[in-house]
Image (cartoon, grey):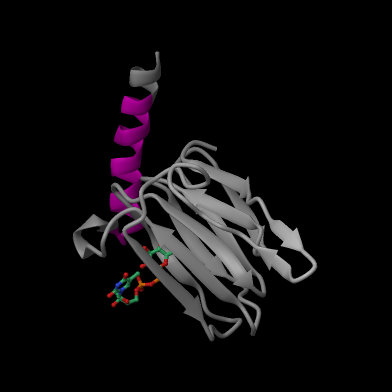
Amino acid sequence: MTNVSLVDLKVIEDARGKMIPLEYPKQLNFPLNRIYYIYDVDNNQTRGCHSHNKLDQLLIAVKGEVNILVKTPFEEKIVKLDSPSKGLYIGPMIWREMFDFSEDCVLLVLASELYDEKDYIRDYREYEQKALEYFRNEETNND
Ligand code: T46
């Protein structure tokens, strides 16, 4: 799916346990400017329900599990994040919804930009219009 990919993160393991380093540009495809983490979310809550104009993000359930719906006007899928070694890259113009958080879930998010409310598209109709234009331009640029 355009601007979405599930990444297997390389685990460094020895007798003392496991570690996953994330470094730009080796394992991260964008320079990191912000991290945040989401936790203590009730199982009946849905978060997200928006898109970003520009932002690149990598989502990792460092503990527990959560489902992520990623959607464009043309396709959608649900990705289960249930391991600290799975990362979900979400680029620009992807609608996302996070739901079915396990009680112990800690969702870590690495982001390419500082927080900017102006980058959010929180209305689905507005998203759809902008996304149709964005993906049309992407197609033209890739011809
Ligand atoms: C995203 C998904 C995966 C800040 O002040 N700074 C921040 O860096 C962030 C992320 C949020 N906030 C404020 C803005 C809101 O007043 O925290 C409040 C909750 O944010 P929001 O409702 O946008 O949270 P989610 O879980 O719906 O979405 C978040 C990110 O905002 C979003 O970029 O892609 O996680």
The magenta stretch spans residue 137? yes
Picture coordinates of residue 5 (x, y %)?
Answer: 56, 43
Q: Position of residue 94 (x, y in %)?
A: 42, 48
101 vs 114, nearest the viewer: 114
Q: Is residue 35 above or below residue 12?
A: below
In the rendered image, the quadrant that contains the C terminus is: top left
Q: Residue at x 50, y 68 (%)?
A: 108
Q: Nearer the viewer, residue 93 or 84?
A: 84
Instruction: Identify the residue at horizontal 33%, vertical 51% (top origin).
Output: 55
**Is residue 59 at all visible to an observer of this figure?**
yes
- Is residue 97 found inside the magenta-colored segment of the image? no
In the image shown, does 28 or 73 lie closer to the viewer?
28
Left or right of 28: which side holds 20? right
- On screen, residue 8 versus residue 1, left or right, reads right
Against 94, residue 59 (above or below) is below
Would you say the magenta stretch is mainly helix, strand or loop? helix
Ligand 1 resides in the quarter of the picture at bottom left
- In depth, the one of 83 and 26 nearer the eye is 26
Q: Quarter-wise, where is residue 117 in the image?
A: bottom left
Q: Look at the picture and state if 120 lies above or below 7.
A: below
Which residue range is magenta in the image?
121-138
Q: Which picture quadrant has residue 140?
A: top left
Q: Position of residue 82 (x, y in %)?
A: 69, 65
Q: Say which residue appears at 47% left-offset and 47% top-offset.
A: 28
- Farthest front residue? 15
